[in-house]
Image (cartoon, rainbow, N blue to C red):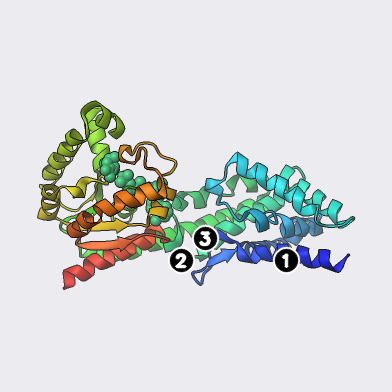
Amino acid sequence: MDGRTLLDFLALAEKMKCHTRHSWTSSGRKESVAEHTYRMMVFAWLVKDEFPEYDMDRVMKLCLFHDLGEAVTGDIPAFEKTASDEDREERTLVMIAEKLPEPYREELKEIFREVVEKRTKESKLTQALDKLEAVIQHNEAPIETWLPLEYDLQFTYGSEQVKGIPYMQMLKEMVNRDTRDKIAGEKARIEAEMRDKKFGYNIVLIGFMGTGKSTVSEYLSTMYNMETVEMDQVIAEREGMSISEIFSAHGEEYFRNLETSLLAELQSRKDLIISCGGGAALRECNVAEMKKNGKVVLLTARPETVYDRVKESSDRPNLHGRKTVEGIAQLMEQRRAKYEAAADVVVQTDGKTVPQICKELVNKIKEMEEE
Ligand SMILES: Nc1ncnc2c1ncn2[C@@H]1O[C@H](COP(=O)(O)OP(=O)(O)OP(=O)(O)O)[C@@H](O)[C@H]1O
Ligand SMILES: O=C(O)C1=C[C@@H](O)[C@@H](O)[C@H](O)C1
Ligand SMILES: [Mg+2]
């Protein structure tokens, strides 16, 4: 092969080391796509005696190249992947193979075709190895790196692909037991931490739209066994319409008055996590209600992060007409002083996972109590 062509292809393969996946290593850093591929191959080699009727050299080759498209596209987590991402990946594979001379080109195209079509028993085994390696990696990673949805996904991920392959099915069940133990361990740790302590007051989450108030409150409620009140949702349910419909039918002032009365009503209760609407902390009288029986936690995020998180949703009327990074930055700046004045504790959320945010939040509240 011409030396330059070879070096260019190696440069493309190097990108497999640069692109990270949505998984963390046991040492707590994100793993690269190449690292996932490497361990799938070790996995394939280890199981070869279990599959005497399979062409295991072929399986090794399918593993070796199954993610090569990601050298160009990067990794897209399974729970975010769309049909158009898959189309793009397939087109990318053809483009990659075209970079090589014959007979390598045709061989690589054949490998890609087999991986994509998933018809042969070797490609089905490759798929099962792929999914199971990812689930094992999650079990090895610190549990703080898991997204809330991964607590369920761990059990279902790969279960389709191992069907009909008894040895892989047996391994999947074993790995599921490890997952169960890991989750139980984390729950026990948190329960022990919380055993002699309920907060004894409400935790009130405030902050700009999309800073993660609802997401954080959902996670806190499952991990700490606390009840949540999602203010927007309670108001929407009581009014029998969405927040956008309330704004257009009655105006923002009407909605804000409902927020004020709901906050006042909640003061008779404790040990709640109250996830406020993004504008609830803007009225001073609301903040006074929050503080009667609660600690106010401000979640923050950069405008770029907020934009990324809210760009697909349409039920935030105060973002209509300003759903751009600049529009968000402007409104955030107008509100910043009020949010900061209301906060007992501030947690910055950019680039952090939900469990990391929750851990920091609880630690900061504890530190505040000790002061
Ligand atoms: N730490 C995070 N990392 C990644 N995505 C996140 C994080 N926190 C929240 N998200 C995502 O951002 C989006 C907005 O989050 P969420 O609805 O919790 O924000 P909010 O503060 O409650 O907004 P609002 O004020 O409009 O109610 C959701 O899709 C959620 O999954
Ligand atoms: O920040 C805001 O002004 C709002 C945020 C949402 O949570 C809703 O409470 C409503 O859309 C207003
Ligand atoms: Mg919310």
Horizontal relation, residue 42 to residue 371: left or right: right
Residue 138 - label: 3
Q: Residues within 10 Å of mark 3 (few under 14, many from 20)?
A: many
- Res. 212 visible in picture: no
Q: CA distance from mark 1 to mark 3?
A: 29 Å
Residue 367 screen position, x and y as percent = 22, 71
Mark 1 or mark 3: name the one nearer the start of the chain.
Answer: 1
The amino acid marked with disc number 1 is Ala
Q: Nearer the viewer, residue 296 or 179?
A: 296
Residue at left offset 33%, top offset 56% = 223
- The reply to whether dot 3 and dot 2 touch (C-beta < 8 Å) is no
**Cβ at disc 1 under 8 Å from ligand 1:** no
Q: Residues within 10 Å of mark 2 (few under 14, many from 20)?
A: some
* Quadrant in the picture for the N terminus: bottom right
Q: Of helix, strand and loop, which one carries label 3? A: helix
* Quadrant in the picture for the C terminus: bottom left
Q: CA distance from mark 3 to mark 2?
A: 8 Å
Residue at left offset 43%, top offset 61% = 351
Horizontal relation, residue 337 to residue 153: left or right: left
- Say which residue label 2 marks: 142
- Say which residue label 1 marks: 11
Residue 58 screen position, x and y as percent = 80, 56
Residue 253 screen position, x and y as percent = 17, 36
- Res. 278 visible in picture: yes
Q: CA distance from mark 2 to mark 1?
A: 32 Å
The amino acid marked with disc number 3 is His
Residue at left offset 21%, top offset 28% = 250
Q: Of helix, strand and loop, which one carries label 2? A: loop
